[in-house]
Amino acid sequence: MTTVLVVDDDPQIVRALRINLSAHGYDVLTAGDGATALRVAGEPDVIVLDLGLPDMDGVAVIAGLRARATTPIVVLSGRTGSVDKVAALDAGADDYVTKPFGMDEFLARLRAAVRRTRRGPNGEPPVRTASFTVDLLAKRVRRDGADVHLTPTEWSLLEVLIRAGGEPVGARELLTRVWGAGHESATHYPRVYLVQLRRKLEPDPSRPRHLLTHPGRGYLFRA
């Protein structure tokens, strides 16, 4: 059974999510503030997080979670501005759903977030660059002799680009393959996450050698 941690201080939202998630076979945990969410972060399979919490901002909670866990995080927030969305995604959120929301779409996005962490890659040999090594079988990235922590979405994006064999992958295709159906309009997602990957993997993120933008065609990986 998939365990969901719902972090929200609105009792009506929590109740509605508990009823619907339980009806769809999820085990539901709840937290009404950021401090509680950080204490139980190691237990759930996926986290649903509101940004407007009573004790701390949700973006700070995301950063705290990301410092020690790769659990997928789906933001569920009434904040609709692009600044809030980019801040949450840049901090490590895997998806962003605005309130009010349709339950069917929300459940689909939740399934996609969980699926990205559970699907198993084929057993290829490690992909080596001059800067880092990617083990597709173990879902492991190493740079300068140390493991590099990637969020589930960052990993999925990197894997899709590597498997493209050096060919550019368009933004819409990336949105479908990494984030799932219903994200076709979120064209900033690949750009934001590619910036994050470059910061973690490229020796000089401002002059990338391996994670490249191909004007007019999309994004590509070059060993």
Image: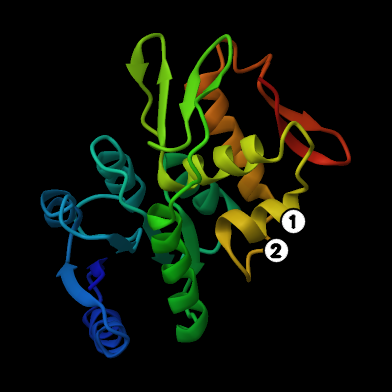
Amino acid bearing label 1: Arg
Residue at the spot x=63%, y=35% of the render?
Answer: 162
Residue linked to disc 2: 184
* Image vertical order of residue 115 relative to residue 26, above or below: above
Task: Give SS at disc 1.
Answer: helix
Task: Give SS at disc 2.
Answer: loop
Residue 216: which disc?
none
Residue at the spot x=27%, y=83% of the render?
Answer: 25
Residue at the spot x=14%, y=51% of the render?
Answer: 35
**Is 211 in front, or is 18?**
211
Label 1 vs label 2: CA separation? 6 Å
Residue 65's image quarter? top left
* Image vertical order of residue 161 relative to residue 29, above or below: above
Mark positioned earlier in the residue sequence (1 or 2): 1
The image quadrant where one finds the C terminus is: top right
- Kindly indicate whether the residue at mark 2 contacts the one at mark 1 (C-beta within 8 angstroms): yes
Left/right placement of residue 60 relative to residue 107 reads: left
* Image vertical order of residue 80 relative to residue 61, above or below: below
Amino acid bearing label 2: Glu
Residue 27 percent across, percent down from the top left: 19, 76
Residue linked to disc 1: 172
Residue 117 percent across, percent down from the top left: 39, 53
Residue lying at the far right of the rendered structure: 216
Q: Residues within 10 Å of mark 1 (few under 14, many from 20)?
A: some
**Is 180 in front, or is 122?**
122
Residue 130 percent across, percent down from the top left: 58, 9
